[in-house]
Image (cartoon, rainbow, N blue to C red):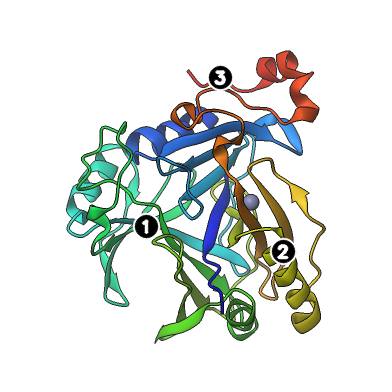
Amino acid sequence: MTAHPLHHVTAVAGNARRNLDVYTRVLGLRLVKKTVNFDDPSAYHFYYGDEAGAPGSILTFFPWEQAAPGRLGAGETQETLFRVPAGATEWWAQRLEDAGLDVCAPETRFGETILPFRDPDGMRLALVEVAGAGDEPAWAASDIPAEMAIRGMHGVRLLLRAVAPTAAILRDVFGFAETGRDGPVVRMEAVDGPYGSVIELVEAPGSMPARMGRGSVHHIAFRARDDAEQAAMAEALTRDHRMQVTDQRDRNYFRSVYFREPGGVLFEIATDAPGFAVDEPAEALGQALKLPAQYEKHRAEIERILPALG
Ligand code: ZN
């Protein structure tokens, strides 16, 4: 069965300038697209990724200055994990602390060394040491040494009241297979390329429902190679799992369908094409404010109301 690893994770931030500073300067990700929220063009939509903006490297944010803090709970992504080369944990712990971020002690999970930390909005992130990641290209323009730099997304942890219904969908439709269990955590993997292959499901039957807000993950997206593959997945979800899947939406850089999985997490299926170089040159990704066609005539007004970044 075809593997459909993560395409991107989308979260809610507060202050736009602070978000940009943490993810580009401190973490060394590349801003690969600066656009607006297609449903609320008074707010930015930032896309961070690797040098090419490859599927599976992408973390995106809606920065809403006035958003109330979220509360972690069931039906939500608990943690988003990024890959770093083996041996990089100590260097990162110091760097994140120096940047004033809330850093936890390193842990070992499923044999991997993990450094959990939080961004300034309280979003839970972690760096995972991955053998061989140091041989993969890092973003050349970052000032972070290549032997330390983040190499795309590793995976996510979902907090669920019950794991089985979500696991069934990941297995039957997204091509994930169980690769480990540790107490209430079920680890599943779908490998296609280096990025986004791990989903860990944490069962917490008594957990309160999550409250979306600043620092919360809004949704996670899985990869489909093209429209036909996406349509087949949507059909399987409807037919075999009684999911209600939306019609396809054009997100300019990919085409998407959405559904809320049985545990309450919003899932998206996003196509690999056309990618982030569709409306600006690859070497200039993220520099100019890009607007979808319907907002281009309002560019002056939109630029005036968006928060200052400099
Ligand atoms: Zn999305």
Nearer mark to the viewer, of 1 and 2: 2
Q: Quadrant of the N terminus?
A: bottom right
Q: Residue 173: x percent and y percent? A: 64, 77
Q: Quadrant of residue 230?
A: bottom right
* Secondary structure at numbered mark 1: strand
Q: Which residue is mark 1?
A: 126
Q: Residue 164: x percent and y percent? A: 60, 86
User: Dot 3: within a 10 Å radius of its alpha carbon, few (fewer than 14), some, or many (20 or more) residues?
Assistant: few
Q: Which residue is mark 3?
A: 308
User: Dot 1: within a 10 Å radius of its alpha carbon, few (fewer than 14), some, or many (20 or more) residues?
Assistant: many
Q: Indicate which disc, 1 or 2, sits on the residue closer to the N terminus.
A: 1
Q: Nearer the viewer, residue 292 or 90?
A: 292
Amino acid type at image mark 2: Ala
User: Dot 2: within a 10 Å radius of its alpha carbon, few (fewer than 14), some, or many (20 or more) residues?
Assistant: few
- Using the numbered discs, state the Cα–Cα distance from disc 1 to disc 3 in whole angstroms: 29 Å
Q: Which residue is mark 2?
A: 228
Residue 197 horizontal side relative to residue 237, left or right: left
Residue 245 horizontal side relative to residue 189, left or right: right
Q: Is residue 57 above or below residue 139?
A: below
Q: Indicate which disc, 1 or 3, sits on the residue closer to the N terminus.
A: 1
Query: What residue is rendered at 40% in x and 35% in y?
Result: 24
Amino acid type at image mark 3: Ala
Amino acid type at image mark 1: Ala
Q: Residue 151: x percent and y percent? A: 34, 51
- Using the numbered discs, state the Cα–Cα distance from disc 1 to disc 2 in whole angstroms: 34 Å
Q: Does the Cβ of the disc 2 residue fall within 8 Å of ligand 1?
A: no
Q: Indicate which disc, 3 or 2, sits on the residue closer to the N terminus.
A: 2
Asked if one can make out residue 13 in the rendered structure from this viewpoint, the answer is: no
Residue 93 tag number: none
Q: Residue 268: x percent and y percent? A: 66, 60
Q: Is residue 51 above or below residue 77?
A: above
